[in-house]
Amino acid sequence: MPAIRHAEPWAIGLRTTVRTSTAEGWSVCEFRGKVRLEVRQVGSPKQAVFLPFDWAKSNVGDVLTRVRNIYQLVDEGHSLRGAADIAEGKAPKAVADWSGAVVRFKVQKMEHGRAVKPVTWQRCYQPVLDTAIEILTGRKPPTNPADLLDLAIRKWPPGSRARQIRAQSLAQFLRYCVNRENFPVLWMPPLDLASHVGAKGIHSGPSLKGDPLTDQQIINLINSLPVDEAGQRWRDALKLLAELGLRPIELQHLSVRSDTTTGRPHWWCSYRKRSGGGDTQPRRIHALPLVDAEGSPQRWSLIERWQAGLIALPPLSSGNGAGDAIATYLNRQQGWRSLRAALETKGERAVPYSFRHSYSLRGHQRGIDAGSVALSMGHSFEVHCRSYPWASTSGAQEAFERANEALMTAG
């Protein structure tokens, strides 16, 4: 039997090609006349498998093809032994059941842990997961989570809250697939999604979150609404949003309770919201009456009318929820369209949440500390400081003028 020469040009070329076409730590060698594939990775024991080829020049092409196939399978998450068996036809390559995983993920999200509501699933999860499944079952599906994220969320504007939510929802699904469905670990999504969400461009327009309105703008808007029975319902809904700083959905969770000490009535909201910024708990809400341009407080008597059964809210449960119902109604009203047009000329945006933003600004302008305003609005101090307005340009100017006037007078 002729001696095997490891230094022959074809053997050197084979080992060199394996190293350059795979990754660091991958190599082949001769062992008892057969080809042995070895993988050395930092922090892990050496792995090795025998390939069904003799160590011979005539098998170089087959060896290289087999090694590259095994490398691709390992990159997809298979073990070295499992990849070698699949490449040799000893074991079938598992096909990921993405559609079935979505069905099971929905059950997990809606029935276990911090269960989400059906409307949350439909709004935050279903759209992006439908898109992801369409991509993954297409002709050229992505082979890694980063590419999948980019493809699945590109229909939403870069830097938008909607795009951020969809990225987070898809990342949750991918983590579920790896941890619970035993999908290859390569599908574990990146921890930092910022590069996928992106940022708004300089020409992206005003904030989608909306800007606060002045008390007089709100008063004018409400006075412009129809005075029939349906119009009165919407008038009362907007008055409650403005005076109490509610989220639109909280109109459906509002009630009046009596103080245990004084017996005086106060507003109570039973809504619970789960978010990354902390849970919203049922809470007492403090009214902040609006004041018109002449300095006269608006005495809408909302709590008295509520107790007397004189407030009937408009339908808010149809479509995509209360916020969408309010937006749909307002977009039909000339007073709202005119207000939006006026704000757009200043680079500002009016949305249903603008009534809530106005409440925050009104509270700070009246000297109420941020913690108290945040408590009444139902979010954390950190969220309040990050997301809600503290001052207006005109209010800041007046505040500095008063401070300087007081200083000059005292001097």
Image: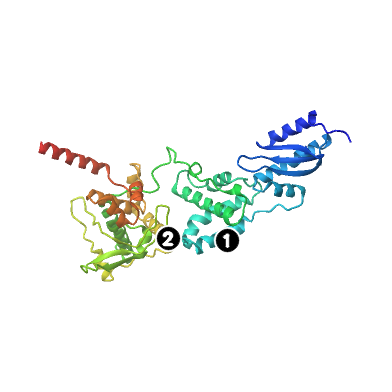
Quick one: quadrant of the N terminus?
top right
Residue topped by disc 1:
104
In this orientation, which residue lies closer to the viewer: 152 or 334? 152
Image coords of residue 30 (percent x, y): 78, 37
The residue that label 2 is drawn on is: 321
Mark 1 crowdedness (10 Å alpha carbons): few <14, some 14-19, many ≥20: some
- The relative height of residue 161 versus residue 12 in the rendered view (above or below) is below
Q: Are marks 2 and 1 in contact (CB under 8 Å)?
A: no
Q: How many marks?
A: 2
Residue at 55% x, 59% y: name it: 105
Visual colour scheme: rainbow
**Picture layout, residue 259 above or below residue 378:** below
Give the structural element (helix, strand or loop) at label 2. loop
Q: Nearer the viewer, residue 369 or 214?
A: 369
Amino acid type, mark 1: Arg
Residue 223 appears left or right of 165:
left
Residue 389 percent location from the top left of the image: 31, 47
> Image point 50% across, 41% down: which residue?
195
* 152 and 386: which is toward the camera: 386
What is the crowding at mark 2: few (fewer than 14 residues within 10 Å), some, or many (at least 20)? some
The answer to which quarter of the image holds residue 331 is: bottom left
